């Protein structure tokens, strides 16, 4: 992982329209290695849209954005197919990304060993979230973009996720997360929409 | 650029086609439906059935492409998979093409392979022609799936998108249907029809993925 | 941030003058063309007698159906490359009007066809088939735009479809020509080409010009309405935001 302190993401003056409604404008942020930025705002303020913008999924109506490092994306929707098991899901994305990660080890870290071979349509919401978080460990990427990461997680799940995020931050990783609750990891900056 | 994301997309789509879309059972169901309903509707006259048989198979192919494709990109948009495919760094056109190809293999090819059987039920003579026709259905079905894929990608976020796909895809199916039918009837001036069928299929495979990619980026936006 | 969009003020000023002019000149041309076509020019027995006079609506409609799809494709392309909002407004305005003229072309063709061919619909006529598929392209475009949940998405989806349609039009045309050339050639309606007698040509061209002007005027009026509707939507949105 990179040891320089050059910004991983630099954005300024971002704005987005939904129909004719201005969702937000003039949003600027800078993400450096080790940073944890938390996005705050009421429902509908545009947190998800801003994250999607930073992931390159949504085009800003105005503003500048430089994305200098590869990122992981954990959206509101997990991206798990009904027929995919957690093991199969991680294996598929390991194949897609050319990752040689130890999948049984990731499943164990995510406490998914028992559910490892259950098809997606039978997984609980929390198990689906854990499976998606497993993707974070498939490949070392400096930036993690997390949309409401605590959603559907139980207390043990949150503790586990906090540990994973803290570990990432300690090794010079960086995250941007939209959240409603207090974060269980060291936050460097909050952006309110 | 590595081909790994494209292969992974193909693998996932193929698994999904067999799991969710029942794989080859769907087009074979069409085949059965067409084979039974058409003679019931138009009568059992041998000459009539012989005349409409090849056309019925083309219609079944077109329908199977529309019905199969309705869900493929829509499901991706709903479950979040589309977001992940858009972020692999591989060209989205290649990923869309891989997914379309996978669904054609699961739903279009089995129908083409079963076409000689249906042709026999429609009173065709058992001859080598049936195998040549099989080749035409294989090619034409591929074009149907690629143009249908454009409609499917454009309506990925639309509820009841199936109706929309039909109206979008119909005019795009015209050249394939005409060249395909001409190649089979083998009348005057149709010598070049098989080549035209192949060329228009190639055109579809070359152009449609870019339109699908643009439409899928829009669906995720 | 509104500067990111094209400023439509100039268009509103220009079209406030141009649209009425187009309507007036168009009406004069169409009326003169119809008067010539229906009462002055001699009927042509080879083209079905008096029924051939429908040509003075049918042929301009056919020209406009082709021209309007081309215009739709060009506007979509311009929007897709330069994101000029006026181009999208134009595309949105052209589509339903193009569909109307395309349907008019089919209807008049059918009326002309019944006494001459003996059937309302002739599958072997390449032109009718091509125009029918053009109508489907228009309808698909309109249905797609209508099903998108924001104007930005409607613009993008519409532009993609219009461009896909445009690159397919030559192929559709070619395949339909091939299809029909193998069957009975449709030689009844020869409205264009050197076979056309000069006595018909002038009223036809004037009539065509009139339809073009009327079409242009209607497109401008639609665009003016759309510009104002978008402005209202923007004002409403900013008022709601406070």
Image (cartoon, coloured by chain):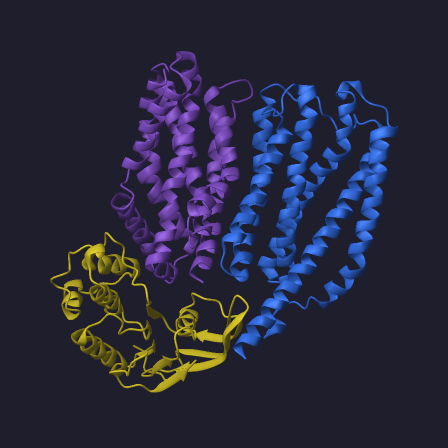
Q: In this view, does C226 lie above or below B20?
A: below
**At 64% across and 20% down in the image, what residue appears?**
C185
Q: In this view, does A145 lie above or below A186?
A: above
> Image quarter for residue C6?
bottom right
> Image quarter for residue C138?
top right
**At 48% across and 67% down in the image, what residue appears?**
A59
Pinpoint residue C94: horizontal percent, then vertical percent: 65, 50
Q: The purple chain is which one?
A: B
Pinpoint residue C97: horizontal percent, then vertical percent: 66, 47
Report which colour depicts chain A: yellow
| Front one among B193 and C35 | C35
Q: Residue furthest top?
A: B46
Pinpoint residue B63: horizontal percent, then vertical percent: 40, 35
> Image quarter for residue C125?
top right
Q: In this view, does C205 lie above or below A146?
A: above
Q: Which chain is blue?
A: C
Left or right? Give the position of B141 relative to A22.
left
Q: In this view, does C26 lie above or below B183?
A: below
| Front one among A161 and C170 | A161
| Front one among B126 and B22 | B22
**At 75% across and 35% down in the image, what residue appears?**
C57
Q: Which quarter of the figure is the C terminus of chain B placed in?
A: bottom left
Left or right? Give the position of C63 relative to A118.
right
């Amino acid at each position: 992982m990179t040891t320089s302190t050059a910004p991983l993401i630099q954005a300024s003056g971002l704005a987005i329209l939904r129909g004719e409604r201005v969702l937000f404008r003039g949003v600027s942020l800078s993400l450096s290695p080790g940073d944890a930025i938390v996005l705050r705002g009421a429902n509908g303020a545009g947190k998800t849209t801003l994250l999607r913008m930073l992931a390159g999924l949504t085009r800003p109506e105005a503003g500048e954005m430089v994305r200098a490092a590869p990122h992981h994306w954990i959206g509101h929707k997990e991206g798990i197919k009904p027929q995919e098991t957690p093991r199969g899901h991680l294996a598929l994305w390991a194949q897609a990304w050319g990752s040689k990660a130890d999948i049984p080890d990731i499943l164990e870290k995510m406490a998914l060993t028992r559910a490892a071979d259950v098809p997606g349509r039978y997984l609980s919401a929390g198990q689906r979230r854990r499976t998606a978080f497993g993707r974070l460990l498939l490949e070392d990427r400096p930036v993690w973009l997390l949309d409401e990461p605590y959603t559907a997680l139980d207390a043990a799940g949150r503790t586990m996720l906090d540990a994973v995020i803290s570990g990432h931050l300690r090794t010079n990783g960086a995250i941007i997360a939209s959240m409603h609750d207090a974060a269980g990891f060291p936050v460097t900056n909050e952006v309110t929409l | 650029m590595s081909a790994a994301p494209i292969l992974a997309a193909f693998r996932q789509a193929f698994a999904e086609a067999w799991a969710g879309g029942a794989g080859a059972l769907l087009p074979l169901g069409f085949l059965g439906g067409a084979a039974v309903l058409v003679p019931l509707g138009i009568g059992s006259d041998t000459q009539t059935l012989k005349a409409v048989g090849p056309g019925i198979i083309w219609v079944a192919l077109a329908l199977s492409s529309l019905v199969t494709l309705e869900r493929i990109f829509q499901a991706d948009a709903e479950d979040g998979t589309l977001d992940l495919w858009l972020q692999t760094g591989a060209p989205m056109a290649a990923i869309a093409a891989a997914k379309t190809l996978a669904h054609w293999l699961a739903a279009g090819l089995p129908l083409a392979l079963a076409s000689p059987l249906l042709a026999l039920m429609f009173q065709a003579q058992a001859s080598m022609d049936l195998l040549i026709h099989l080749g035409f259905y294989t090619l034409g079905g591929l074009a149907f799936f690629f143009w249908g894929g454009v409609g499917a990608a454009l309506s990925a976020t639309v509820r009841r998108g199936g109706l929309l796909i039909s109206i979008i895809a119909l005019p795009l199916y015209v050249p394939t249907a005409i060249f395909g039918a001409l190649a089979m009837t083998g009348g005057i001036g149709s010598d070049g029809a098989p080549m035209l069928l192949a060329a228009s299929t190639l055109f579809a495979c070359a152009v449609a993925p870019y339109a699908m990619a643009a439409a899928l980026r829009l669906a995720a936006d | 941030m509104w500067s990111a969009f094209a400023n439509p003020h100039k268009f509103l000023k220009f079209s406030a003058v141009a649209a009425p002019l187009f309507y007036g000149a168009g009406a004069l041309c169409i009326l003169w063309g119809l008067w010539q076509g229906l009462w002055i020019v001699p009927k042509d027995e080879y083209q079905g007698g008096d029924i051939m006079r429908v040509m003075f609506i049918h042929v301009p409609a056919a020209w406009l159906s082709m021209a309007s799809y081309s215009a739709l494709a060009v506007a979509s392309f311009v929007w897709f490359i330069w994101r000029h909002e006026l181009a999208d407004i134009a595309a949105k305005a052209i589509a339903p009007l193009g569909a109307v003229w395309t349907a008019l072309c089919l209807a008049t063709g059918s009326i002309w066809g019944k006494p001459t061919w003996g059937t309302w619909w002739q599958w072997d006529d390449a032109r009718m088939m091509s125009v029918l598929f053009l109508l489907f392209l228009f309808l698909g475009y309109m249905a797609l735009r209508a099903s998108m949940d924001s104007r930005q998405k409607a613009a993008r989806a519409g532009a993609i479809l219009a461009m896909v349609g445009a690159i397919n039009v030559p192929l559709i045309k070619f395949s339909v020509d091939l299809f029909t050339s193998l069957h009975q050639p449709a030689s009844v309606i020869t409205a264009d080409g050197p076979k056309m007698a000069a006595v018909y040509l002038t009223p036809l061209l004037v009539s065509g010009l009139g339809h073009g002007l009327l079409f242009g005027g209607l497109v401008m009026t639609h665009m003016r309405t759309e510009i104002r509707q978008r402005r209202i939507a923007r004002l409403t949105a900013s008022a709601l935001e406070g």
